[in-house]
Image (cartoon, grey):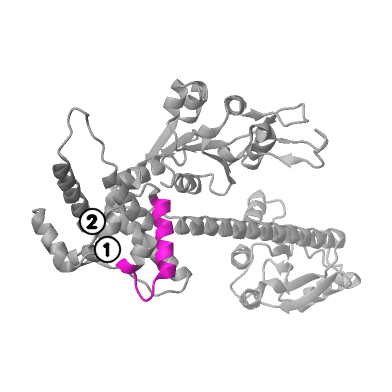
Amino acid sequence: MIKAKIKILIIEDEDYDVKRIVNTLEPFKDMMVIKNIVSSGRDALKIIKKDPTNYDVIILDYQISGGLYGVELITEIKKVDTSIQIIIITKMTLNQTDLNFAAELIRSGASWFGTKTPIDIEDFIYQPTDFLLAIQNAYEKRQLQLEKSKLINERDETLTKLENSVKNILSKRKIIGVSSQIEQIRFFISKYTDVNANILIMGESGTGKELVATHLHYLSKKRLENFITVNCSAIPDTLFESEFFGFTKGAFTDAKAEKIGLFEQADNGTLFLDEVGDLSLNAQGKLLRALESGEIDKIGRNKRYKVNVRIISATNKDLAQLVKQKKFRQDLYYRLNILNINIPPLRERKEDIEPLVKYFLNIYSFEYNYNITDISKDVMRFLNNCDWYGNTRELKNLILRMVLLQNGGINMDIARLCLKDQLHRKIEELENIKIPSKDFILPLKEAEKNFRIKYIDAVRKLFLTDSESAKYLGMAKSNFHRLLKELNLK
């Protein structure tokens, strides 16, 4: 049922025929409205270009005068708006049975063709029923095309928003570093993104395993699908099935509503299993079955559910060693470890420390509205000498503390306030001297001198000047210089 009136444009150069068209449409004025009447193709094209939404259906005399007519005019109108429907009327001077002519009309975009003749019908268009039905059908075709265009535009807008969201995620979660190890990780990511195989990421806590997994997903063809993450160490063994595979309503006493499991949530996308080495042997077996079959057993449902999920796993444990200790299933290990990426600890790629410091400094300076563009050289020197057992996460947290506690700049005073853990760790490393053998013990004086040499040398490496070192040790500068001379360190 047509709710809105059909908006019609008549392109006709003979008043006699205009009158016949108007008379034919008059009984249907509650359904149709003639928006305009023009006598030349060029004038018609001008008003259509001005506002194509003004017209749904065009009634066109094929042999109109003025130089722009027929197939050429139809083609030009379709260039303006492909959804506008064109109904052709003409005298019978054209061969009605010419197949080539009919094909040309259809290809150019006409939706119906009828004649004005015979001439003894003075008041109406010949074949008025076909003519009116053609107008209605043309209008409905235009509405369908407009709806299709709307859906396509909405889809394109949604895809654009999703693509922009992906770009935003990647811009906020950059892989920072200049070391050869980081370049190798970037290389692996570029090669693995669109490979439909499980990937195992290995590395100490804080090295950025989830960051690598994020890039693997959001740079792949699956980037617009779900990226579901789960910390396996946080899932109790008794809840493994319900969390990973879900359950139906009424499957057990407390199942008051259906639960969608992690595998279903990640269907056609990526499921990231963080700390996968913490799964129990029982949970490992259930996970293996799902990976081998590509199907899940949802609690309370007899029929198995097919899923298409890429698994990315991460662990800070040596899974190969756990396999030897019978703590991790060998078959699951090989299933997860089809492709792998190893992230070295930060202490093994010291050249990445400075770029990371500058990156986090910019991030937190902007976030908390501070104008901090750099830190002092002595602080950077100290940071480069730290071992960072907490890796990138520890460095990131440290930069946040320094940004929040700074007072116009980040210097060693701020560093001492924030770096207690690192400073104490350095001292503990020096204090924990292991005696290689009870048969080889140095005289106390010699051992003490050796310790003092190592201790003072280590402290000096942490600071830019000897004055800073003396200040931290609680010594006068002159006394510190004498000590250096005594230990042959000057």
Which residue is nearer to you in this view: 178 or 194? 178
Query: Is residue 407 a member of the stretch shown in magenta?
Result: yes
Residue 348: x %, y % from top left: 29, 44
- Give x and y (percent) for residue 3: 85, 66
Q: Is residue 153 left or right of residue 317?
A: right
**Residue at the spot of label 2:** 459
Question: Residue 86 vs residue 159: left or right?
Answer: right
Say which quadrant the N terminus sits in: bottom right
Q: Which label was assigned to residue 246?
A: none
Displayed quadrant of residue 131: bottom right
Region in magenta: 392-413
Q: Magenta span has 143?
A: no
Q: Which of 50 and 76 lies nearest the eye of the viewer?
A: 50
Q: Quadrant of the C terminus?
A: bottom left
The residue under label 1 is: 472
Q: Earlier in the sequence, mark 1 or mark 2?
A: 2
Residue, far right: 27
CA neighbours of label 1 inside 10 A, class few (<14), some (14 to 19), many (20+): few
